[in-house]
Amino acid sequence: VQLQASGGGLVQAGDSLRLSCAASGRPFGNYNIGWFRQAPGKVREFVAAVSRFGSSAVYADHLQGRFTISRDNAKNTVTLQMYSLTPEDTAVYYCAAQRRDRIGPGSVRSEDYDYWGQGTQVTVSS
């Protein structure tokens, strides 16, 4: 499956932003989809993941409540809605796909994902 992340940009602290991950290739419903981010000089960190049909989601503890992940399998897209952004949210955001039946502990580790998009830059100014 091929993934394309989009929607990044430059915003101010307190703003909201919505990222999209568009998929093509293999049946989209075969994959859990996760979002990760990587800030300069830092390791890639888990943001959120959604199950194959959108029935469940998991979030990084420190982001839950500000970020919402959802998917539309009819449109082969996953959306990451981000609220109340802070400069600490500045990073390149990546979407990734893993072929598993359900999300779980393995959905928060980048090494457990099989396919990656190219990333989209989010910059939050103070």
Image: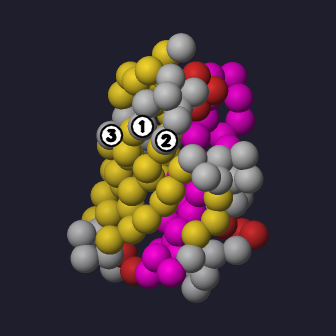
Per the rendering, the mark at residue 118 is: none
Name the residue furthest top: 126
Say which of 51 and 42 sits in front.
51
Q: CA distance from mark 3 to mark 2?
A: 14 Å
Q: Is-magenta flag for residue 49?
A: yes
Relative to 89, residue 29 above or below: below
Do tag 1 and tag 2 residues touch (Cβ < 8 Å)?
Answer: yes
Q: CA distance from mark 3 to mark 1?
A: 11 Å
Bounds of the magenta span? 30-55
Relative to 115, residue 5 above or below: above
The quarter of the rendered structure image containing the N terminus is: bottom left
Relative to 50, residue 9 above or below: above
- Secondary structure type for disc 1: loop
Whichever of callouts 3 and 1 sits on the residue coming sooner in the sequence is 3
Q: CA distance from mark 1 to mark 2?
A: 4 Å
Residue 118 percent across, percent down from the top left: 41, 43
Q: Mark 1 — residue?
A: 16
For the point 48% across and 60% down, the residue is 69
Q: Mark 2 — residue?
A: 83
Q: Mark 3 — residue?
A: 7
Label 1 crowd (10 A; few <14 / some 14-19 / many >=20): some
Say which of 124 and 35 sits in front.
124
Q: Is-magenta flag for residue 82?
A: no
Q: Is residue 26 visible?
A: no
What amino acid is found at the position of numbered circle 3 in the picture? Gly
Residue 62 percent across, percent down from the top left: 72, 46
Q: Is residue 69 left or right of residue 10?
A: right
For the point 33% across and 40% down, the residue is 7
